[in-house]
Image: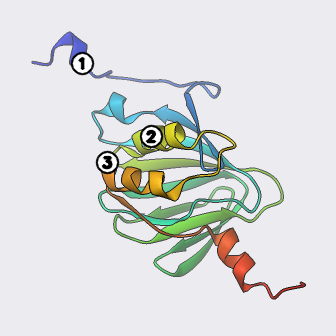
């Protein structure tokens, strides 16, 4: 029998304006269902990504991740495969795949992300504590956090890779 202190909720509701807000590496995340509330079974969060922004190339060793595009246009890269996704589309990346995405629209894009098992929200909390809003991320401080959460940082965001491809003076 579970003690009252460790009891998990049998039902949850988060209204559109509720959730824990986290700012992580240029994105605004609102955790709708936390890992703590599901005994780490899953996490659900809404993310707002500014135009031409997105996370660095990375992988999760232990988590599957899916994104439902609420609003906007995104370019995903999953194990080298380019995927274009728009409002209403869903994208899935299996654990162990190299992946990233970029908002290719002209306004902030929004996605609802589900991660199984949970824990990505805890990763975001650790990242936010190390790299607060407006601070330039310190890779030396980020790498141990990636390792702690069974993730690997593999490369720069798509925007940074595209900037390198552009010839000088263009």
Q: Earlier in the sequence, mark 2 or mark 3?
A: 3
The residue that appears at 70% across and 59% down in the rendered structure is 53
Q: Give the crowd class for mark 3: few <14, some 14-19, many >=20 residues within 10 Å.
A: some
Q: Earlier in the sequence, mark 3 or mark 1?
A: 1
The residue that appears at 32% across and 50% down in the rendered structure is 148
Residue closer to the observer: 156 or 99: 156
Residue closer to the observer: 144 or 60: 144
Q: CA distance from mark 1 to mark 2?
A: 25 Å
Q: Is residue 133 left or right of residue 6?
A: right
Q: Position of residue 117 (x, y in %)?
A: 31, 48
Please name the residue that numbered disc 2 is placed on. 126
Please name the residue that numbered disc 1 is placed on. 7
Q: Is residue 141 left or right of residue 147?
A: right
Q: CA distance from mark 2 to mark 3?
A: 18 Å
Rendered position, 122 above or below 109: above
Q: Are marks 3 and 1 in contact (CB under 8 Å)?
A: no
Rendered position, 11 above or below 169: above
Q: What secondary structure is marked by label 2?
A: helix
Q: What secondary structure is marked by label 3?
A: loop
Q: Mark on residue 117?
A: 3
Rendered position, 169 above or below 124: below
The residue that appears at 59% across and 74% down in the rendered structure is 83
Q: Position of residue 156 (x, y in %)?
A: 58, 69
Q: Could you tell me which quadrant the N terminus lies in? A: top left
Residue furthest to the top: 4
Q: Position of residue 77 (x, y in %)?
A: 55, 73
Residue furthest to the left: 1
Residue furthest to the bottom: 167
Q: Could you tell me which quadrant the C terminus lies in? A: bottom right
Q: Position of residue 163 (x, y in %)?
A: 74, 76
Disc nearest the viewer among 1 and 2: 2
Q: CA distance from mark 3 to mark 1?
A: 19 Å
């Amino acid at each position: 029998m579970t003690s009252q202190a460790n009891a998990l909720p049998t039902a949850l509701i988060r209204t559109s304006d509720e959730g824990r807000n986290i700012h992580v590496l240029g994105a605004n995340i609102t955790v709708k269902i936390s890992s703590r509330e599901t005994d780490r079974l899953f996490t659900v969060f809404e993310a707002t990504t500014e135009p031409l922004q997105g996370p660095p190339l990375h992988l999760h060793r232990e988590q599957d991740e899916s994104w439902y595009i609420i609003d906007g246009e995104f370019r995903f890269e999953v194990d080298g495969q380019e995927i274009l996704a728009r409002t209403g589309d869903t994208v899935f990346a299996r654990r162990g795949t190299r992946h990233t995405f970029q908002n290719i629209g002209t306004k902030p894009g929004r996605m609802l992300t589900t991660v199984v098992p949970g824990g990505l929200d805890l990763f975001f909390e650790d990242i936010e504590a190390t790299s607060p809003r407006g601070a330039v991320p310190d890779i030396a401080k980020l790498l141990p956090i990636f390792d702690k959460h069974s993730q690997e940082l593999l490369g720069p965001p798509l925007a940074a890779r595209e900037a390198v491809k552009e010839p000088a003076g263009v």
